Amino acid sequence: MLRLTGRRPTPRRALPCGRDPACFSFWGASGAVGGSPVDSARYRTSPTESGNPHDPPFRAACPPRSSTTGPSPCGHSVKRPGRQESAGGEPPHGCRDPGGTSSADAERTPGEAAGGTPREVLGAPHRLLSVVAEPVDPTAPEVVVAAADLLATLRSEPSTAGLAAPQIGLSWRLIAFDARRHPRSRSWAGELVVVNPRLAAASHWDHAREGCASIAGLTADVRRATRITVHGHLPGSGEPVTIEADAFEARCIQHQLDHLDGLLFLDRVPGALSLHRRLHTCDA
Amino acid sequence: MGLSAVTVLGVDRPGVIAAVTGSLADCGANIQDSTMTLLGGHVAMMLLVSGELDSTELLKRLSASDLVVTASAIEARRHFCDEGDGLGYVLTVHGPDRPGIVSAVSAVLAADGGNITGMSTRLSGRLYVLIADVELPKEVDVAALMRQLAAVGASLDSEITFRPVEPDLI
Ligand SMILES: [Zn+2]
């Protein structure tokens, strides 16, 4: 058996993890293929199998939407209505301000960092990765715990910039992302968990290659908006949040939103030649 | 001017493409369409070449110990659909690996006169992925076809999406 491993050096910019900067999930590090829902007794809900308005018929991927309200030119602000900047205003699950101070890491309290438990990332094929997730109450204690776990899982996957709750076995509408490490990032909303996120505007469509922590070994060129506006709520406080993202962060958020609708990037591949196998030595 | 279809299969190593295309150039063959990919670490290359070619001579020049080469004369280019007559779709299937996925899905398309114009399948761990470019005759009932695909997908435990090709806007 011949192996492709070790044959191709990666001439692109090196990342701390040494992986492919073209993918926002550089590598499905866990390689957890066929994992089972974690702690299902505690968290699992009954996802809707049908009749959900978010579920397009026959999984037809939604056509690109054109924006009527584009994001501001700077495109990297996080607006939190009614919230004043204050050192003590840190919400419980890791929302830090964009372009945060140099002490951003120091502001991450031990309680916040330790608040969640990393969970196994489910690998496709898995039923929970193909069903529409349920909206949840952002202030509910179990949702706060889930948000902390999602964030803890994201932090435990150093090559992954975003995760959605279905990937850790929860069919709830929660996403977590942190675009900071990616070389093609421009906007950075911080390390953020958003509950019931919804896309309000999307524009400036472009193709780029992406991967997924739940899909080991494959990437594809996928068309996404490079400027988006997303509304949602912060876990714990339930505070409304609006994210205006561009470039890589916008792509990452749209990828996570797809997870909430039971869609994988594979469902948006534009053609037979757009599917790729990752060529990395860590492909094991 | 004659057209020949050339296929090259072999172990992937640096220089395979240079050797093959160099031999073709020496024969006076002009490469028209070609595609090349790696399948499990093996080179798979198909070329449509034009020129006054002697396929025996071509094969002799292309032969190498680690390559399997075929060359055959073919008729002029042909199209299944008249230009602009078909409707372009992209089919994605992903799910657990099992025998018969490609045949089951392609049979549904074929029954409606659908033509697969490009296809990639990948097995990664337990996950099987199929992406196909499909051209449908205009008169096909797409909704009915989608229902059939959905039924096949369900029987295979696989997710299927079938969507129109995104138009190239630029
Ligand atoms: Zn993903």
Image: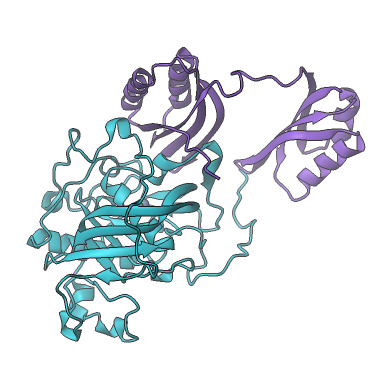
Q: Residue at point 53% right, 51% down?
A: A278
**The image quarter in which residue A195 lies:** bottom left
**Residue A117, visible in the rendered structure:** no
Please tell me whether residue A73 is drawn above or below residue A197 in the rendered image.
below
**The image quarter in which residue B76 lies:** top right
Q: Residue furthest left?
A: A140
Q: Residue at point 12% right, 67% down?
A: A236
Please tell me whether residue B95 is drawn above or below residue A88 in the rendered image.
above
Horizontal side of residue A94 vs A73, given as left or right? left
Q: Quadrant of the N terminus of chain A?
A: top right
Residue A149, percent from left and from top: 21, 63
Q: Residue at point 20% right, 67% down?
A: A116
Horizontal side of residue B45 vs A230, given as left or right? right
Q: Residue at point 53% right, 40% down?
A: B168
Horizontal side of residue A157 vs B133, given as left or right? left
Specify how the rendered protein is coloured: by chain
Residue nearest the viewer, comparing A218 with A52: A52
Residue B127, percent from left and from top: 41, 40
Residue A215, percent from left and from top: 40, 48
Residue A48, percent from left and from top: 17, 38
Q: Residue furthest front?
A: A68
Residue nearest the viewer, comparing A235 with B6: A235
- The number of discs equals 0
Q: Which chain corresponds to the colour purple?
A: B
Q: Which chain corresponds to the colour cyan?
A: A
**Residue A275, visible in the rendered structure:** yes
